[in-house]
Image (spheres, rainbow, N blue to C red):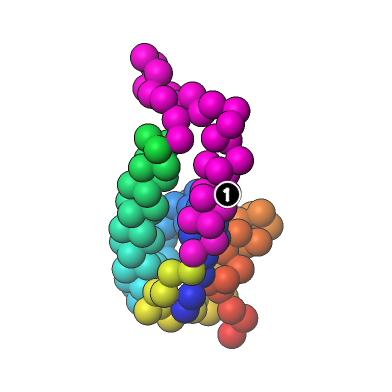
Amino acid sequence: MNITIKNILDSKEALERLAVEKLPVRTSYNLGKFLKAVNKELEIFNEFRNELLNKYGERQEDNTYKIDSGNIQKFNDEVIELINIEVHFDFELLLLDSLGNVSISSQDMLALDYLIKES
């Protein structure tokens, strides 16, 4: 399965909420493997994002970054390019029935739509 880093970022909180639910063993195992791979990709993403912050910004005393107005567009363009990178995961889609009686909000279902298919 190929998904963009943007999809991962947009669904991270929903994934974490789903991960704490009691799921059938196989579903829980597959989801755990996927989350481990997602977290690794997010570490790599954060490293590159931090490189961009260092490249275009100046670290402040409070550990935030200030980006000069002349560099904002360049920074934004590179961040957009970064979040649109597709990442491959070897992951079986979750069958809706495999989620059991878990209650998932509509908002979380929308965020996780790339992971779940109807049975």
Q: Which residue is mark 1?
A: 77
In this view of the protein, which residue sits in the foreground, 116 or 8?
A: 8
User: Can residue 39 be seen here?
Assistant: no
Q: Is residue 61 above or below residue 52?
A: above
What residue occupies the far right of the structure in this picture?
A: 106
Q: For this view, does 102 lie left or right of residue 37?
A: right
Question: Which percent across, then down, holds residue 86?
Answer: 48, 69
Question: Which percent across, then down, holds residue 103?
Answer: 58, 58
Question: Dividing the image into 4 quarters, which one contains the C terminus?
Answer: bottom right
Q: Is residue 66 above or below residue 114?
A: above
In this view of the protein, which residue sits in the foreground, 103 or 70?
A: 70
What residue occupies the far front of the structure in this picture?
A: 70
Does the magenta portion include 64?
Answer: yes
In this view of the protein, which residue sits in the foreground, 106 or 44?
A: 44
Q: Quadrant of residue 64?
A: top left
Question: Which percent across, then down, holds residue 115?
Answer: 53, 71
Q: For this view, does 88 lie left or right of residue 84?
A: left
Residue type of the residue flagged with mark 1: Asp
Does the magenta portion include 91?
Answer: no
Which residue does the image show at 33% across and 51% down from the upper left?
A: 43
Q: Which residues are magenta?
A: 56-85
Which residue does the image show at 37% across and 67% down from the upper left?
A: 34
Which residue does the image show at 33% across and 47% down from the upper left?
A: 47
Q: For this view, does 64 lie left or right of residue 113?
A: left
